[in-house]
């Protein structure tokens, strides 16, 4: 986000566009004024002034430009003379990748580290609707700052994800689409009601945070305890139908007890059991989310260390069926029944596969029949 002052003139000196005294604010990549302007701005520093001479092919070319949107009419093939000043530049972060949560940084934070997922954070903010109606304040006007743990659904999703990108002391404006805010329901807040489908804006400052410790910062016993806790959190999320978040918990839990040579023999046995359990649970999440390649990958990781694991064979077979890899599914089902001949779930899956294979064979037979059937030529007499 840049604030810029400019004056645009033709070769004869006629001014065709000029900003107000305070300049104009715009997203750099939106191509404001001229398509090539972003490249110029990215070379400038705050407060810098520059004079640009823009050839017609880089301005409005042989078509010129009609009057409107702050411009006077510009004749075809006109060279432009532009005086510009970069008043300010505020970094804009597309938090979600689809512009549903946007963070505009007004004050840079300290250091190189941001609050990661699982961090204990302390923030102060004013929360508003798009029209400026304030519906909540924390840490402002004698209210207490808000303390919460990121990635634990303790605040709305958009705020949660944006805060996890902030540094200590950073101040930003966060714009949040309803899908990442309060959705299509009316929510009563401290100072006002948030109507259904409202976009919300947070003027927020990161007061402080304590990052969640990385695996390498913990001893063996601590790693196992964290992994067990995250696995249990994943189980609760899975039971609530929050499969995407559950999958993340299982993945993190497995990371904390990855085989890195730091664990003793007894600890490694427990760690292996945790890894296998988390991979299997993660595969179950993938199946729920229709991420069949993900399920296959996780089940394969289990089978690399426990080749006889029936759950892994069963879930991988489920994924293979969904991707129509029937031969591979058949192999896994046969292996699972060799280990556990009476497993009811595997038997049911075997029957399902048999029916799907029969249906597939019929389709193939019809296709081949149509491809190779003799063609007769009809002659009218």
Image (tube, rainbow, N blue to C red):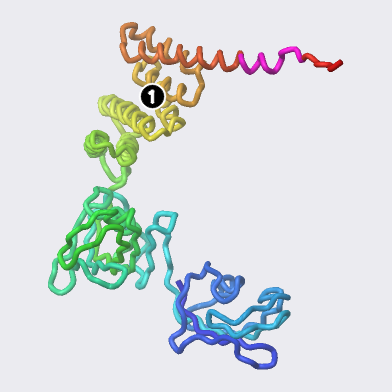
Crowding near the residue tagged with mark 1, few <14, some 14–19, many ≥20 C-alpha atoms within 10 Å? many
Image quadrant in which you'd find residue 377? top right
Position above or below: 2 against 301 = below
- When asked about the image quadrant of residue 292, the answer is top left
- Residue 273 drawn at (x, y percent): 29, 25
Residue identifier under label 1: 302
Q: Is residue 173 above or below residue 164?
A: below
For image coordinates 20% across by 58% down, the residue present is 187
Give the percent coordinates (x, y) of residue 68. Answer: 56, 80
Q: Is residue 64 left or right of residue 211?
A: right
Quarter of the figure that contains the C terminus: top right
SS assignment for the magenta stretch, majority: helix
Q: Is residue 261 visible?
A: no
In the image, taking residue 235 as reference, residue 60 lies left or right, namely right
Residue 207 seen in the current view: yes
Indicate the secondary structure of the residue bearing disc 1.
Answer: helix
* x 30%, y 50%: residue: 117
Q: Which residues are magenta?
A: 366-375
Between residue 253 and residue 352, name the one nearer to us.
Answer: 352
* Residue closest to the far bottom: 13
* Residue in front for this viewpoint, 10 or 261: 10
**Residue plotted at (60% across, 74% down):** 34
Identify the image quadrant of the N terminus: bottom left
Residue 105 among magenta residues: no
């Amino acid at each position: 986000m840049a604030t810029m002052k400019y004056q645009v003139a033709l070769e004869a000196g006629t001014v065709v566009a000029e900003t107000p005294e305070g300049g104009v604010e715009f997203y750099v990549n939106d191509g404001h004024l001229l398509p090539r302007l972003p490249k110029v701005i990215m070379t400038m520093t705050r407060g810098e002034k520059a004079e640009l001479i823009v050839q017609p092919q880089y301005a409005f070319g042989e078509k010129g430009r009609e009057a409107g949107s702050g411009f006077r009419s510009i004749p075809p093939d006109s060279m432009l003379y532009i005086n510009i000043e970069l008043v300010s530049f505020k970094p804009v972060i597309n938090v979600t990748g689809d512009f549903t949560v946007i963070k505009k940084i007004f004050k840079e934070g300290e250091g190189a580290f941001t609050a990661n997922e699982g961090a204990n954070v302390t923030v102060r903010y004013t929360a508003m609707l798009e029209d400026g109606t304030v519906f909540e304040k924390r840490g402002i006007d004698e209210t207490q700052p808000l303390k919460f743990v990121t990635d634990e659904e303790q605040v709305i999703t958009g705020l949660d994800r944006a805060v996890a990108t902030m540094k200590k002391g950073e101040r930003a404006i966060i714009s949040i689409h309803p899908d990442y805010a309060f959705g299509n329901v009316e929510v009563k807040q401290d100072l006002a009601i948030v109507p259904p489908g409202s976009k919300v804006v947070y003027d927020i400052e990161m007061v402080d945070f304590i990052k969640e410790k990385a695996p390498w910062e913990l001893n063996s016993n601590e790693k196992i305890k964290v992994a067990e806790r995250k696995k249990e959190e994943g189980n609760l999320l899975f039971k609530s139908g929050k499969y995407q978040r559950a999958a993340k918990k299982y993945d993190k839990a497995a990371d904390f007890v990855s085989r890195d040579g730091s664990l003793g023999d007894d600890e490694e046995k427990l760690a292996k059991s945790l890894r296998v359990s988390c991979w299997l649970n993660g595969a179950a999440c993938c199946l729920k989310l229709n991420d069949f390649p993900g399920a296959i990958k996780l089940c394969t990781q289990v089978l690399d260390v426990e080749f006889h694991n029936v759950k892994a064979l069963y879930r991988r077979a489920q994924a293979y069926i969904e991707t129509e890899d029937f031969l591979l599914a058949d192999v896994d089902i046969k292996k699972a029944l060799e280990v556990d001949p009476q497993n009811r779930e595997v038997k049911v899956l075997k029957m399902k596969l048999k029916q799907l294979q029969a249906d597939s064979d019929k389709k193939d037979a019809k296709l081949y029949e149509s491809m190779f059937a003799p063609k007769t030529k009809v002659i009218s007499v």
